[in-house]
């Protein structure tokens, strides 16, 4: 008998199964062609961005364990809406995923590309609920000029606490040595952000990314769990010290 994946309990750091259970709760919230059409959000928002053909829709669908949550256009670059997906148990939204249009595809007119680059840049710079960004990149191409321009534009927000992850997709196309090289180069380029390999086909990195996104979406719970763990460790150390003191033999009596 199969069971529904369970989301992590409040205050508890998630294991992979629990984090994936949380990701599986993703459901469509709304779509917008312009920034002013996006609703105000009072929970953490995590945006997925990247060049067309970087595997963004496949990544979202794999993390959510849903085949058609994020739409993958047959003509890359033609999906020109910001799509929001709610996360959390039914009736309780605790985070939002934002799927931004792919950029940089040659088949789209220059005016369309420039317009959507402006929309995305404004979103990434001004969206108040934005908590973290996942930048998807094909490791065979590396970070492109557009990717690096995006990271540079985000630098002030990153310095102010915005989280970001560079996800090197299609890792199954590379050997282990090539993966190690791609990770090393991208970490230097990313300037402090997280960098992970990811393969929807081989499920490489799926568990780790789900856990990282949960932690980013629940910073208070994550901090509370760390504090509880520290308190428990301190209490255990004190108890051990007291037990050792009680078990120690009394000191020799001094001669009269």
Image (cartoon, rainbow, N blue to C red):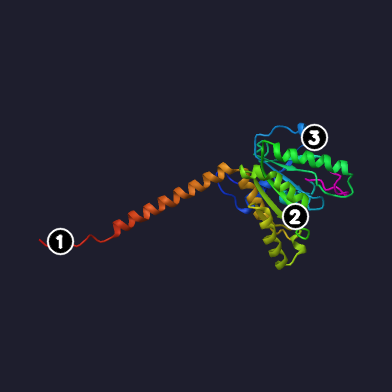
Question: Magenta span covers which residues?
Answer: 69-80
- The residue where tag 1 is placed is 254
Badge 3: residue crowd in 10 Å (few <14, some 14–19, many ≥20): some
Q: Residue 140 occupies which quadrant of the picture?
A: bottom right
- Residue 252, compared with residue 119, is above or below; it is below
Q: Secondary structure at mark 3?
A: loop
Is residue 237 in sight in this rendering?
yes
Q: Secondary structure at mark 1?
A: loop
The image shows residue 13 at horizontal and vertical percentages of 57, 49
- Residue 88, compared with residue 177, is above or below; it is above
The image shows residue 210 at horizontal and vertical percentages of 66, 51
Distance from the alpha carbon under mark 3 to that under mark 2: 27 Å
Q: Residue 173 occupies which quadrant of the picture?
A: bottom right
Q: Secondary structure at mark 2?
A: loop
Q: Main secondary structure of the magenta part?
A: loop
- 241 sits to left or right of 147: left
- 143 sits to left or right of 210: right
Badge 1: residue crowd in 10 Å (few <14, some 14–19, many ≥20): few
């Amino acid at each position: 008998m199969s069971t529904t994946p369970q989301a992590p309990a409040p205050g508890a750091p998630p294991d992979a199964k629990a984090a994936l259970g949380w990701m599986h709760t993703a459901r469509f919230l709304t779509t917008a062609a312009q920034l002013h059409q996006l609703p105000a959000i009072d929970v953490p928002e995590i945006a997925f961005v990247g060049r067309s053909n970087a595997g963004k829709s496949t990544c979202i669908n794999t993390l959510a364990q849903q085949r058609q949550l994020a739409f993958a256009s047959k003509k890359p670059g033609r999906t020109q809406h910001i799509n929001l997906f709610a996360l959390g148990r039914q009736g309780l939204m605790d985070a939002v995923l934002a799927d931004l249009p792919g950029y940089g595809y040659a088949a789209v007119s220059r005016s369309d590309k420039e317009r959507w680059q402006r929309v995305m840049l404004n979103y990434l710079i001004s969206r108040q609920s934005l908590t973290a960004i996942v930048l998807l990149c094909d490791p065979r191409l590396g970070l492109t000029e557009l990717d690096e321009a995006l990271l540079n534009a985000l630098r002030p927000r990153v310095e102010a606490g915005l989280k970001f992850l560079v996800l090197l997709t299609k890792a199954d196309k590379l050997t282990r040595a090539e993966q190690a090289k791609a990770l090393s180069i991208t970490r230097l380029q990313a300037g402090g952000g997280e960098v992970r390999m990811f393969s929807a086909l081989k499920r490489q990195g799926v568990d780790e990314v789900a856990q990282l996104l949960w932690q980013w979406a629940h910073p208070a719970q994550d901090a509370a769990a760390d504090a509880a763990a520290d308190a428990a460790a301190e209490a255990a150390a004190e108890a051990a010290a007291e037990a050792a003191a009680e078990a120690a033999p009394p000191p020799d009596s001094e001669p009269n």
